[in-house]
Image: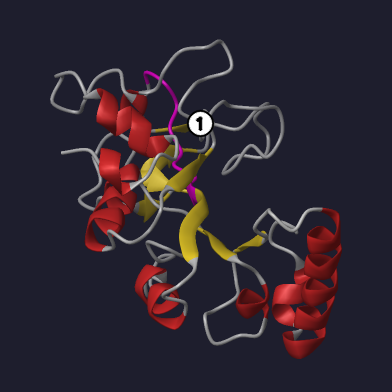
Amino acid sequence: MGNEVGEQYTGEEGAKVARWLVAIVREEDPTRQTTTSMNYARPEMPLPATVDAIGINYQGAGVRSLPPQYRPFAEKFPDKILFESESASTLSSRGEFLFPVSGSISGPVRPGSGGDPARQQVSAYELHAADFGSSPDREFAAMDQNPTVAGEFVWTGFDYLGEPTPYYGARSSIRASWTLPGSRRIGSGSISRDGGPISSSHTSCRTGVGPAARAR
């Protein structure tokens, strides 16, 4: 019904709009499930209860210091499909290895910690993400700990023009598995951090097929 819609913030008023939209969908095609992608709503809020499948953006693994939301949603809605409709938003510039290397598996980009604002580049080690996102390692760990989650859709498959987080003077985004020229980044299935190959299951997990294909 929508992605990161404002109705998440308006309680029962927003849920009323959602129920109206769900009714329209079911009138047109009663065989299809309804969903919406939520980056703010919590399980106890009215909006999630209105749809058939629970889609959450970035909340699954937890955003920075906020607790992960996979388990709370699964416990609140045990009979509904739960999936991460947007995950990761990991930032990296292909071929740029900045030092010192972060001691965290998932952190924000800051000057001297994964980022070079003068050159508008982010370290290629994939240990940094947008402030609302998580690294692949953190996402994989969260999926392993919550096997009932159906899967995830990584933001994003290909770089694109616009939204050049974290450097708004840049031309394009730097958060995709594939760069604009069509080259794979390190974490997207080409090579691992120790220089060895990454299995196809690693790539599959990052493209949304779910826990059955988790990286080992």
Position of residue 60 measured from the top left corner of the image (x, y, whole percent): 42, 63
Q: Which residue is mark 1?
A: 176
Quadrant (top left/top right/bottom left/bottom right) for the N terminus: bottom right
Q: Residue furthest front?
A: 31
Which residue sits at x=28%, y=48%? 140
- Provide the major secondary structure of the magenta segment: loop
Quadrant (top left/top right/bottom left/bottom right) for the C terminus: top left
Name the foreground residue: 21 vs 157: 21
Q: Is residue 156 above or below residue 44?
A: above
Q: How many marks?
A: 1
- Check disc 1 and report its element: helix, strand or loop: loop
Does residue 91 belong to the magenta stretch?
yes
Please say whether residue 112 is visible from this viewpoint.
Answer: no
Q: Is residue 174 above or below residue 167?
A: above
Please say whether residue 28 is visible from this viewpoint.
Answer: yes
Q: Is residue 23 above or below residue 58?
A: below
Within the image, what quadrant is residue 79 found in? bottom left
Position of residue 16 measured from the top left corner of the image (x, y, whole percent): 81, 82
Which residue sits at x=78%, y=73%? 18
Name the foreground residue: 178 vs 172: 178
Q: Which residues are magenta?
A: 87-95
Position of residue 111 measured from the top left corner of the image (x, y, whole percent): 43, 46
Q: Is residue 68 above or below residue 207?
A: below
- Say whether residue 137 is left or right of residue 132: left
Which residue sits at x=60%, y=75%? 41
Which residue sits at x=21%, y=26%? 192
Circle 1 Cα neighbour tier, 10 Å, few/some/many (<14 / 14–19 / ≥20):
many
Does residue 166 belong to the magenta stretch?
no
Which amino acid type corresponds to the residue marked 1 in the rendered image? Ala
Q: How is the image coloured?
A: secondary structure
Name the foreground residue: 107 vs 192: 192
